Image (spheres, rainbow, N blue to C red):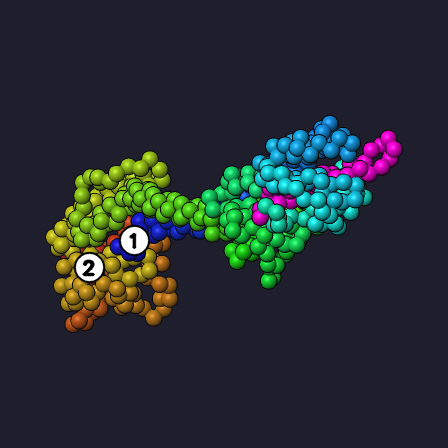
Amino acid sequence: MSGSIRNRIVLSHWLVVLLVLLLLGPTACWLLSGELEKQRFQELDFLASHMAGMVDNRLEWYSRQLSDLVRDPLIRSFPETARVPAVADLLGRQREVFPVMVYMDAKGWEEVRVVHGQPQVYLAPFDDQAFFSSVEKKPNRIVTGKPLKSALSGEKVIPMGYGIRRYFGDRFIGALYGELRLSRLTSFLGTVPVGRTGFILLVDEQRRLLYHPDAEKVFAPLAKPGNGQDWVQMALDGERGVGEGEILGVEVLLGYAPVKSLNAALVAVLPMEEFLEAPNKMKKAILLVMAVLLVVAALVARWFASRLTRPLLQLTDLAGQIAGGALPEQINIQRTGDEIDQLVDTFGNMLAELRNSMVSRHYLDRILAGMNEALLLVGLDGRVRTANRAACELLGRDQTDLVGQQLESLFKVEAQTSEPWLQVLLASPGESRSRQQLKGVDGLIPVNFAWTVLADGSGHVREVACLFSPETKAGLLQSDLGQGQH
């Protein structure tokens, strides 16, 4: 059955579906994976840009807090009033945001210092004179220093200073210094989800981590990538974008954006392992769908093939029965409503004609066998097709020996006769008679010879009937010839 038409139809349909799925499946995976990557990059780009903007806004908000303190009358009038306890109390109330606050005079001497809300009496030059100089050179604005670990509070902070310069008299009267807790600025970054295992990094210009989900890694150095783009440096240079790379030894997708107020880079990181989970699940789903479609395609193809080939297989079985000699009266073959029905009808008509011709042939064979006169049926090729018993006895030869012989070889032919016997017989399509001599096994046999041309229902000549009778039976030849033709 492996070579049956049904199996071939099933296989061809299944292979077509398989080919389509093999083309569409990988294409769908590639397109969907690319779309997922594009979507992730868009999310990371938006997240990095938005979070960088929020860091800038929060730093600006804390800067305004420091500016508002400078505008307080206690601070503005301190050079004249020197109300140390009142100023210390004012600065101490900022301990949640600024654990260290210092008021300095115009020469950089500390006049008020508050650490964790506790005032300290310490009249000495400010420790970071370089920072004081930058504040003095940029009065009436917030100056932000590089993040550091405070020697006074032991916390990771961002130094901030405000130089106080009076417009009336145009003179520098002092500065207010505060150390902003770094965690106050960056803690909200830990509440922002980046996928399931992703995170956000904040890196300064010295490539130190200002924020990492693990607080122990803050201020730890971030190594440059061994190969590929240095996305962090691109963000530090003021660029914004997305890419793939290695961060802290992990292959990641990332989005980056500059934090201009800190001269830092914010990086939103999504581990590649997590990103690949979605494409892998999608590929498994596509493979499952392909497998289901292949099974369904095989079942549907088998159903259609069975419906299409069942009549053909029934016709094949019927042809085998006919070849074995059986001629059924009816054809019980399922109708399909298409061209196969025409084939079944044609086969039925052929079977009916074959049945009729078989009956007629059987009847003719019985007539020929019962005739007393010798009869030969000759085809259009001039060869004997049928010889009855009387002809075999007359010539003294078996039927198998006569069938296939040329008609001319059975007669004594005159030397001057050149026209073939068959042409002579066909030239007289009606009943004709003559006297001839047949070649018997014992010699020549004088006979009365009669013949007639036999045609089918459409008028086409099929055979020539030849009757032979020894000259003693010439009177009976005419009636036997008429019976044989009929």
Give the camera-side residue of 184 and 236. 184
Over which residues does the magenta segment extend?
154-182
Look at the image and tell me whether residue 414 can be seen. yes
As measured in the structure, the alpha-carbon distance from the residue carrying label 1 to the one carrying label 2 is 44 Å
The residue singled out by tag 2 in the image is 387
Residue 344 picture location, percent across and down: 29, 41
Q: Are marks 1 and 2 in contact (CB under 8 Å)?
A: no
456 lies left or right of 248: left
Measuring 34% from the left and 70% from the top, which residue is drawn there? 415
- Residue 296, numbered circle: none
Q: What secondary structure is marked by label 2?
A: strand
Three-letter amino acid code of the residue under disc 2? Ala
Q: Which residue is mark 1?
A: 4
The disc labelled 1 sits on which kind of residue?
A: Ser
Crowding at dot 1, Cα within 10 Å, few <14 / some 14-19 / many 20+, comes out as: few
Name the residue at 69% across, 34% down: 84
**Residue occupying the point 33% across, 57% down:** 380
Q: Is residue 73 left or right of residue 441?
A: right
Residue 361 vertical position relative to residue 97 in the rendered view, above or below: below
